[in-house]
Amino acid sequence: MAVIAPEWLLRISTPEWFQRYGRRVEHSNLPKSEAERAQLSIAIAADGEKLLQAVESSSMRDELSKLEDLTTLRRVWEEQFEHVNGQLRSREVKAMPSPATLIASP
């Protein structure tokens, strides 16, 4: 998206995105406590959801939707996250699709 629509991406980005995604995520950079990791996971989920919604409402939707990375992002979000009582949360393992169909990420 940054190559195809850099101005659009800059308009929808938040300062927090630059803090979260401005450098490569390494295990050593992740929060140490389980509660902080869960909080970060939900923040990342909300960021992805915002990006996907922005694509859907964009005049560039057709062009952006052809991007393989966006297709992967959409699939991962559907696999990993859900809305329950209006709240975004990580899916419980039992609510996830079959492991054979999940996207594996390093």
Image (cartoon, grey):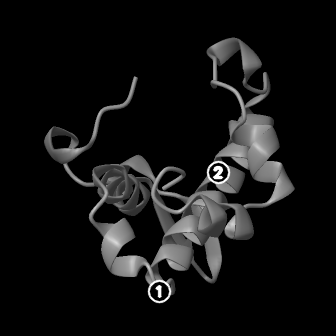
Quarter of the image with the C terminus is top left
Say few, some or many: other residues with alpha carbon within 10 Å of mark 2 (under 14 / 14 to 19 / 20 or more).
Answer: some
Q: Is mark 2 on a helix, strand or loop?
A: helix
Residue 38 percent coordinates (x, y): 69, 43
Give the CA distance from mark 2 to mark 1: 24 Å
Q: Residue at x 34, y 52 (%)?
A: 94
Query: Residue beneath label 1, please?
Result: 59
- Left or right: residue 80 compared with residue 10: left
In this view of the protein, which residue sits in the foreground, 4 or 74?
4
Query: Can the viewer see residue 11?
Result: yes
Residue 56 percent coordinates (x, y): 45, 81
Q: Which mark is residue 44?
A: 2
Rendered view: 23 above or below 95 = above
Q: Which residue is drawn at 63% across and 24% down?
A: 24
- Left or right: residue 61 compared with residue 98: right
Camera-near label (2 vs 1) is 1
Query: Can the viewer see residue 35?
Result: no
Q: Is mark 1 on a helix, strand or loop?
A: loop
In this view of the protein, which residue sits in the foreground, 105 or 92?
105
Q: Residue at x 27, y 64 (%)?
A: 66
